[in-house]
Amino acid sequence: MEIVYVYVKKRSEFGKQCNFSDRQAELNIDIMPNPELAEQFVERNPVDTGIQCSVSMSEHEANTERFEMETRGVNHVEGGWPKDVNPLELEQTIRFRKKVEKDENYVNAIMQLGSIMEHCIKQNNAIDIYEEYFNDEEAVEVMEEAPSAKTINVFRDPQEIKRAATHLSWHPDGNRKLAVAYSCLDFQRAPVGMSSDSYIWDLENPNKPELALKPSSPLVTLEFNPKDSHVLLGGCYNGQIACWDTRKGSLVAELSTIEFSHRDPVYGTIWLQSKTGTECFSASTDGQVMWWDIRKMSEPTEVVIMDITKKEQLENALGAISLEFESTLPTKFMVGTEQGIIISCNRKAKTSAEKIVCTFPGHHGPIYALQRNPFYPKNFLTVGDWTARIWSEDSRESSIMWTKYHMAYLTDAAWSPMRPAVFFTTKMDGTLDIWDFVFKQCDPALSLKVCDEALFCLRVQDNGCLIACGSQLGTTTLLEVSSGLSTLQRNEKNVASSMFERETRREKILEARHREMRLKEKGKAEGRDEEQTDEDLAIDLEALVSKAEEEFFDIIFAELKKKEADAIKLTPMPQQSSPEEDQAVEEGEEAAREGKSEEVEEELA
């Protein structure tokens, strides 16, 4: 298709007509060069000129509207019946079916569809499309990607005065929400005007918290109820226990009375396995572990004093920092103390002294993290100084495995819920370490610098893919780990189990050896006094024997000299002997004496 432009204009508007003709060139002006002006020119060398060769681009931001979903139900009813047939009436439906079955079209349709269905069924019987042809062959080892992690989201404390994120808790249904407790743990250094609010965040909206929890005192711990996701349990800085119901809003639903609460900040809270789902534990550095029922929070149901001397004296109690309860072991719970000792307790014991079953001499400092392995509950993980340690309940004198001593203090740790040999630790220098004992024992499999400030808390999502870390400035960082760190490896359970059992046996052998050495040292210490008296007696006996021997030989020699003198008197006077003969006689007598003395010694021996 040809495009034609047509211009319409009057001739009078064109102006004067141009007449062009060919002619020779003409010189209108000729300016001669002036040497004086040339001297005034300055040469510019070098000449820099900037040019822009890149493509011009502009950045635009678009904030899309949040997609809201709504669930609606659909009621399905039986249809396809004629208007004059009521499907609820059995007689009418049977009569109508008989009428349709007598129709010739119905029989033809059934015969036609039957042949098609028969053909499809025969095809399914001939070929099993779900058959696995290589079941017996072992799976080929595939090179997996290197361990990695990336930041998904960052949730910052919306308050102007920043506080530390002291505890995290995942929503039990779907893990799409995260509860964060904020408080300042520096004793008497809380800034003036600091807020006491804590928040529940939606992972898809990091700009604004979904709900603010307003306690009477800043929260140190915060835990979702695993049976009722609307209920949260919090431990306050002033020692009180608070309970929220998100359906009722931000205000506290239940609060313990101050006179029956803890005397120090509540550093540990944990829900218990019960029929009602309302029982919980709380722990504090005042040396008490309290058993609560949130339906009646006026006073605790029971109080356990952490006195390992079993005298039930509060002044001798060890301050509790962390708690551990495993639903598969409903009668047991464990307490990590600020003195570095782990206490294993029995819930069903009658007296408070009997509730303390045994202790593990753990760390050089407070035990900030204590968690049982989700696959092997007999093994548990602790963090209390510059190391993380793995323990076995069968070995009480020392841990079975431990990490190297780090330069920075460790603050929290957690097992991976998907892999039995993987756990995570946080440090004061803002580093997150991911350990895989199957892959490497001496160093972490992956070490990430999450932030510049100290990391205080850590919590892993139930599927093991997401990790939340809380920092000193109230920033909660959400990280996603690679599939290799969150997927159970082939034969990993057996490898981890054999590793834990092997290290437990090794520690038992070492404990038995140390016990024998201690008993020997104790026996030596007790026998030193007895040995000293035995040595004195032995010295006295030797002196007495030597003295008796000397006296005996003196008597023998005296008798021999007497007999020799008598013999000399009875014998006639011999002739004068020479000096050489006298010397020979004396030597013979001396040899005789020595021979007799040797005979006497042999007889005595």
Image (cartoon, rainbow, N blue to C red):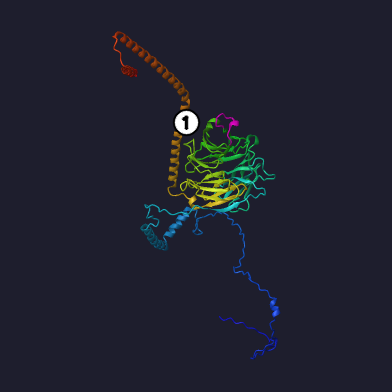
Q: Position of residue 340 (x, y in %)?
A: 55, 37
Looking at the picture, tell me which residue is in the foreground, 143 or 232: 143
Which residue is depicted at the point 61% across and 67% down? 56
Q: 119 above or below 187?
A: below
- The image quadrant that residue 241 belongs to is top right
- Residue farthest to the top, as pictured: 570
The magenta region covers: 307-319
Disc 1 element: helix
Looking at the picture, tell me which residue is in the foreground, 64 or 275: 64
Q: Is residue 174 visible?
A: no
What secondary structure prevails in the magenta region? loop
Which residue is depicted at the point 47% across and 28% down? 522
Q: Could you tell whether 534 is left or right of 161 in the image?
A: left
Point out the image quarter for the C terminus. Answer: top left
Q: Position of residue 117 (x, y in %)?
A: 39, 60
**Residue 315 drawn in magenta:** yes
- The image quadrant that residue 116 belongs to is bottom left
Q: Position of residue 68 (x, y in %)?
A: 59, 56
Pointer 1 residue: 518
Three-letter residue code for mark 1: Arg
Label 1: how many residues lie within 10 Å, few (<14), some (14-19) or many (20+)? few
